[in-house]
Image (cartoon, helix red, strand yellow):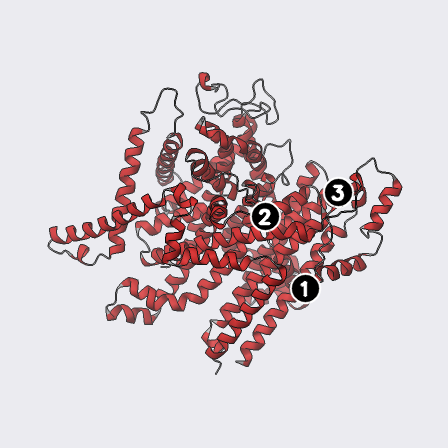
Amino acid sequence: MNSVLRILVQRIGLGILTLFIVSIVIFGSVNLLPGDFAQAILGQGATDEAVAAIREQIGLTKPFWVRYFDWLGALVTGDLGVSYSQLMFAANMGGDQLIPITTQIAPRFYNTMFLAGLTAMIAVPFSLFLGVLAALYRGSVFDRGANIFTLSSISSPEFFLAYILILFLAVQGQWLPSLASVKPDMPLGERVYTTLLPALTLTLVVTAHMMRMTRAAIINLLASPYIEMARLKGISPMRVVVKHALPNALAPIINVIALNLAYLITGVVVVEVVFAYPGIGNLFVDAVRTRDIPMVQICCLIFAAAYILLNLTADVLSILSNPRLRHPK
Amino acid sequence: MSRDMALPFGAAVALVVVLLDRALGLGILSALLTLLQLVMTPVGWVVALATPAAAALGAWKWLVYLLLVIAGGYGFRAAGQAMTGNAPFYRDMTLAVAVGYVFAAVVAIAVAYTYSISFSTAGGMPDSYFFFRLAIHGLAAAVVAAILFRQLGMWIGTPGSRKLFRQMPGTAAFGIFIILCYAIAAIFAAWIAPYGQEEVLAKANIIPLVSAEMGGDPGFPLGTDQIGRDIYSRLIYGAQNTVGIAFVTTILAFFLGVTGGFLAAVLQGWTDQVLSRLVDVLMAIPALIFSLLLITAAASLFKGSSLTVAMIVIIAVIDSTRVFRLARAVGMNIVVMDYIEAAKLRGERMSYLIFREVLPNAYAPLLAEFGLRFCFVFLTIAALSFLGLGIQPPLADWGTMVKDLGQFVNYAAFLPQYAMLPLLPAGAIALLTVAVNFVVDWMLHRSSGLKE
């Protein structure tokens, strides 16, 4: 009991420490490089006074560590700062009404969570089902076909799968919209309908991973003696898997799910761009293109935090589901 | 954690999530709950069937088909049992397997039927079966290529290579064949391609694979892009640029990762700790996100082709962390061997230890990792180029081509061949990674001693 708690506290502490160091890496890698972003904001034709004023405003005159802790402190209190594109707009057009990053990001964060959630809802039951089937009938035509299909789908770039789905489901079939332009006031059903094509693309990628891992986990278990005992008792193969193998395969499977949701994070970026989906991935890519440093930092931190959190969850769940750790001698 | 602790723990987690959700005012929870209800409960399924998405996909129709197939499977098994006098094959067949057979048969018949009618749609109408035929022909060509290539490998070559080809599964033979084709295209691009990669030709927007009266041109079988560059030539040069750059990046990543990993394994102690913790931190950020971040930083220093070089270095460093992990693990197993001890006692230099003692004994796992790593690097570069942040123009590159030609997929409603424009470069990327994965899969299977 105590040992488990200690391991858990240790892991969570490690996760927070990792996040802290990652925030230094993120902040450092865009701020330690030479190059003047004040100049970049205002363009080549700016006067020296204007550049100096902007430099003062975004704090480029201060030393690196002061800037980092200012940034981190503001971050912790929920102030994510103002993007350069907003500053540039204000500098060129006048006006003091700067929209903070928090307001820009919140609806997009929700959209991305919705897309990832919808993908998980479709992909998790589907891939578990297929993985169990492939493990049950391993070596059969179905298993070999599934192997070829999943390998191909893992290896294909996301945009290839996306264009194929657009071609068949949106252009030739006219069943689903090819642009996922969700709006905040959409009713849920319509929102699901609009988001379905990007979600299906992500499902194709994630299902392949999850299914292969589920299959491997179940096959590993099916070799153990108590499964052979269950078989010798004469119960049906499906019952052996569902009643005997699956509960014990839960730990690796939970791990697989968490790891693949972490994998979704990378896939979301490209898929959101293909479908012009208003999520964080799209925002991130736009910020990278315009070199909008504050926005890039925040988006990057959100992705990294989600990634660390999911990996941590996988870690914690596998500890919790391990009886040897739960009941120490 | 004991059973009675699980409940308070779960409640605490749920409370934190709810409070966070309230505080940030995102409403994630309510949406997730509604979705969960939609997917998980029979009531939810009925509700889901009433949504516009289900209506658009004709979900009711498919539900009926599904029930019919299940009934067919039941009937098939019953008929088999009755006709063979309850032979073991039918007697022990589970319903799932019976449904599987019927489903496969239905799909095969549907495919054959669709193929047979796909030629008859002529005369003005857009050819809606174009991609269906293309897929069938492509699959058939792949199967034929794999069989012929394997036969060729069995006839020529040394006895050892002949044996290798005899034991090889069809997918691996196909993979090797495709990799060879790409290598030839990349090396001899300048001789194979009819035009230069940046050569702007007379006519823009020539549609691929159609006759002249439909907007095609026999001189440009795969068409031209918006500013009139030959797609076929650019695809060939893309093999040189995209695959070449990915290959160089992978080699660089391997050089960094393997050197670091073996150093950590051989020296251990402080070096190992510092390198491993550094790699841990770098691996805590997803690779694509991290490379986008570093490219943002690099873009303020470099422009054009030097940005491409910066991207190569960035991706190589990020991917070398993954190689480091494997190289260190493999190296750790090797350095405890007696022959390393003997070499150390002989007073050999560090470089001798790493490159002459450890490396030759780590070839097999590293080679498989090289294939996988190449796929990841290749896909990352393709994704970055697709986002417009990878390989910079004017180099012909598949990811950039997909980005530039992507809009044409929407014209496929008028003429399906339009969609070939983005699908050709995207498919070229997919085909190579699939081929490499097939080969790596076979290699891993072989080296693991044919388990299962």
Q: Nearer the viewer, residue B251 or B319?
A: B319
Task: State the residue lying farthest toward the bottom.
Answer: A329
In this picture, residue A258 sits left or right of residue A40:
left
- Residue type marked 1: Val
| Residue B274 horizontal/vertical position (percent) | 68, 64
Tell me the CA gap for discs 1 and 2.
Answer: 37 Å
Instruction: Assign a secondary structure to mark 2.
Output: loop
- Residue type marked 2: Gly
- Residue type marked 3: Leu
Mark 2 Cα shell of 10 Å, populated few (<14), some (14-19), many (≥20): many
Tell me the CA gap for discs 2 and 3.
Answer: 29 Å
Q: In which quarter of the image is the C terminus of chain B?
A: bottom left
Instruction: State the residue position of label 2.
Output: A279
Which is in the foreground here, disc 1 or disc 2? 2
Tell me the CA gap for discs 3 and 1.
Answer: 29 Å
Marks 3 and 1 share the same chain: yes
In this picture, residue B76 sits left or right of residue A243:
left
Which quadrant holds residue B446? bottom left
State whether residue A282 is above or below residue B324. Answer: above
Q: Nearer the viewer, residue A85 or A139?
A: A85
Q: Residue at the spot x=56%, y=33% of the render?
A: B401
Marks 2 and 3 share the same chain: no
* Count of marks overlaid on the render: 3
Instruction: State the residue position of label 3.
Output: B301
Instruction: Assign a secondary structure to mark 3.
Output: loop
In this picture, residue A174 sits left or right of residue B268:
left
Instruction: State the residue position of label 1.
Output: B274
- Which chain is disc 2 placed on? A
Marks 1 and 2 share the same chain: no
Say whether marks 3 and 1 touch (CB < 8 Å). no
State whether residue B34 is above or below residue B337. Answer: above
| Residue A301 horizontal/vertical position (percent) | 65, 56
